[in-house]
Amino acid sequence: MDHTDLGKELMRKIAYRRTTGVLAAVGAVVLAATACGAQGEASDASTAAMAGASESVAAVSKSATGGVDEVRVEGAGGVEITMRGPIAARYASATSSEKQTLGPPLTGDRNAGTRDNGVVYQQFTGGVITARNDDPGTPAYITTGKIREAWNVVRDAQGIPSTLGSNGSAGPLGPVTSDEVERGAVRTTTFEHGSVAYDTASGAVTVTVQGKVVPTE
């Protein structure tokens, strides 16, 4: 190879290296731009998620003291239901599992309101939330399943099932005074005048009124 050919070969190598360097730089810029674009999309997604969370929170209205004043939620049939006072506070604090068990709230005057004894209530497709009264700060409780069924059995004053008695908070058990307490396989709810225990293993339901076990139904 003469000096002329050697010079040409050297020029080709230099040009190749410069071209490779430029392509690498362009690739780096493209990768950087792509990365920035991905971050932007992630940021937008986060913003959208935060906006969705804000919309959910907007369904809960708080009082001047910071407590839950009312909760708006879609009820059975797609009708918006507004819960207030102790009922709203208990629903707002319910776990995902509790809300799933309760299901959508039911509409109509028979499914929400105040009983003659002052107990306030909201019926759901799978349970009920009740409170002794609608005063702010009054605790409300969730009652579902077999325990609710036993509480709703019409009973006489001694707790014996009877067609001439009363049921629910107006019955011999009285208003609810606790949520379900689970110990092993047994779930128990207390009432002003007794308790109902449900053994999830055996399916047995035990109703106690004024300290005495009475027939379930």
Image (cartoon, rainbow, N blue to C red):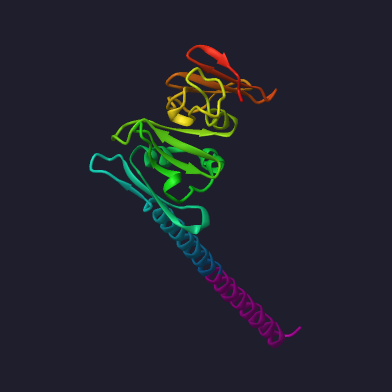
Residue 215, how many percent across, how many down?
60, 19
- Residue drawn at x 38%, y 36% is 115
Q: Residue furthest left?
A: 64
- Residue drawn at x 42%, y 21% is 192
Q: Residue furthest top?
A: 211
Is 192 situated left or right of 25 in this image?
Answer: left
Q: Between 51 and 128, which is closer to the camera in this rendering? A: 128
Is 204 situated left or right of 178 in this image?
Answer: right
- Residue drawn at x 33%, y 40% is 85
Q: Quadrant of residue 50?
A: bottom left
Q: Main secondary structure of the magenta part?
A: helix
Residue 212, how many percent across, how many down?
53, 12
- Residue drawn at x 39%, y 39% is 87
Q: Which residues are magenta?
A: 1-30
Q: Residue furthest right?
A: 1
Query: Which quadrant: the C terminus?
Result: top right
Q: Between 136 and 94, which is closer to the camera in this rendering? A: 136
Q: Residue furthest front?
A: 164
Question: Can you say whether 122 is above or below 155 in the image?
Answer: below
Residue 127, how many percent across, how many down?
52, 38
Residue 56, how many percent across, how many down?
42, 53
Q: Is residue 15 magenta?
A: yes
Number of labels in the image equals 0
Is 2 situated left or right of 49 in this image?
Answer: right
Q: Quadrant of residue 101?
A: top right
Question: Can you say whether 15 is above or below 49 in the image?
Answer: below
Is 14 situated left or right of 109 in this image?
Answer: right
Question: Can you say whether 184 is above or below 76 in the image?
Answer: above
